[in-house]
């Protein structure tokens, strides 16, 4: 049975720059290969970058919404 070594990248890209992010990914893959990795895993949309919409940071906490009178069943 073959044992695979997996490298996981935890890095947050900061710009929607596919070319720069691809170069960064290649550097991570080279580093992982040098460390003996067979597979390299990246975060979702590593190359294209995204952020949650602003509304996500302005939403009320669930507990507050649940306690509001108009939301009670």
Image: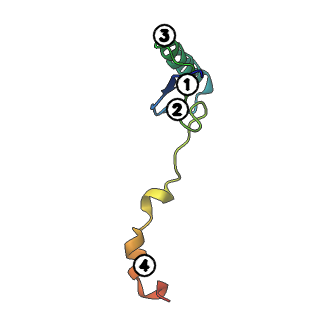
Q: Residue furthest front?
A: 1
Q: Residue at x 43, y 57 (%)?
A: 57
Reply above or below: 47 against 31.
Answer: below
Q: Nearer the viewer, mark 2 or mark 3?
A: 3
Q: How far apart are labels 4 and 1 at the CA level?
A: 42 Å
Residue that badge 4 annotates: 66
Q: How far apart are labels 2 and 1 at the CA level?
A: 21 Å
Q: How far apart are labels 4 and 2 at the CA level?
A: 36 Å
Q: Nearer the viewer, mark 4 or mark 3?
A: 3
Are the residues flagged by discs 4 and 3 in contact, CB closer than 8 Å?
A: no
Q: Earlier in the sequence, mark 2 or mark 3?
A: 2
Q: Secondary structure at mark 4?
A: helix
Q: How far apart are labels 4 and 3 at the CA level?
A: 51 Å
Q: Residue at x 48, y 10 (%)?
A: 34
Q: Secondary structure at mark 2?
A: loop
Q: Which mark is residue 15?
A: 2
**Residue 60 or residue 42, whichever sits in front:** 42
Residue that badge 3 annotates: 34
Residue that badge 1 annotates: 40
Q: How far apart are labels 2 and 3 at the CA level?
A: 27 Å
Q: Nearer the viewer, mark 2 or mark 1?
A: 1
């Amino acid at each position: 049975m073959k044992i695979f070594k997996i490298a996981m990248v935890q890095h947050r890209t900061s710009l929607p720059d596919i070319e720069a992010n691809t170069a960064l990914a290649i550097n991570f893959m080279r580093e992982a290969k040098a460390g003996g990795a067979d597979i390299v895993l990246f975060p979702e949309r590593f190359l294209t970058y995204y952020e949650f919409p602003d509304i996500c940071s302005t939403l009320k906490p669930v507990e507050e919404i649940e306690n509001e009178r108009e939301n009670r069943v």
